[in-house]
Image: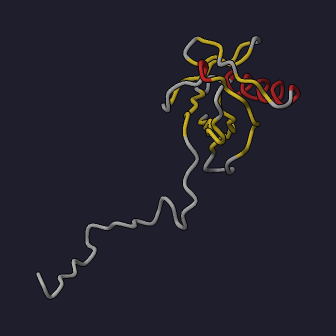
Amino acid sequence: MYLKLIKIRPMISGCHCELWEINHVTGNRHLGDVFVLNEHLPLELIYPLTITHRGIYLQGRHCGWVWDFPKMEKAVNDYLAFVQSTHEEIRVEICQPEPDLPGYPYTDYHPDDYPIVLGIDD
């Protein structure tokens, strides 16, 4: 399973983030909103997740996410625990949101075969 923790709104003490399940078959699904303190915010990489009865762990350390709604936290933890019980590996990518550009990331705004126009003075 592939998850994305997208940093939506950075603040002085931490960052408001959205947790998304990325699934190319059934479509992407928003799992919930969390606040992550700066001391708990990992680098922008991909990490394995482990789910226990105490919560979500990134590389053996409790992630320290503060959920907007406790019921949402329990629902997501139960869902991820079920996925983990099927022996499927769960990974989360910490990332920034994609820019709001038409066709991103499919449009190449600087193609290699773009014509070079020479002026009269050249």
Near-viewer residue (27 or 19): 19
Quarter residue 2 falls in: top right
Query: x, y percentage for residue 74?
Result: 83, 24
Furthest residue in direction right, as rendered: 71
Near-viewer residue (17 or 113): 17
- In the image, residue 77 sits, relative to residue 109, either above or below, namely above
Q: What is the image's colouring? A: secondary structure
Circle count: 0
Query: x, y percentage for residue 21?
Result: 67, 40
In the rendered structure, the answer to whether residue 91 lies left or right of residue 28 reads left
Q: Residue at x 59, y 24 (%)?
A: 41
Query: x, y percentage for residue 69?
Result: 86, 30
- In the image, residue 51 sits, relative to residue 14, either above or below, namely above
Question: Where's the C terminus, which quadrant?
Answer: bottom left
Quarter residue 4 falls in: top right
Q: Residue at x 65, y 14 (%)?
A: 62
Question: Where's the N terminus, which quadrant?
Answer: top right
Near-viewer residue (73 or 40): 40
Q: Residue at x 12, y 84 (%)?
A: 121
Furthest residue in direction bottom, as rendered: 120
Query: x, y percentage for residue 50?
Result: 63, 18
In the rendered structure, the answer to whether residue 122 lies left or right of residue 17 reads left
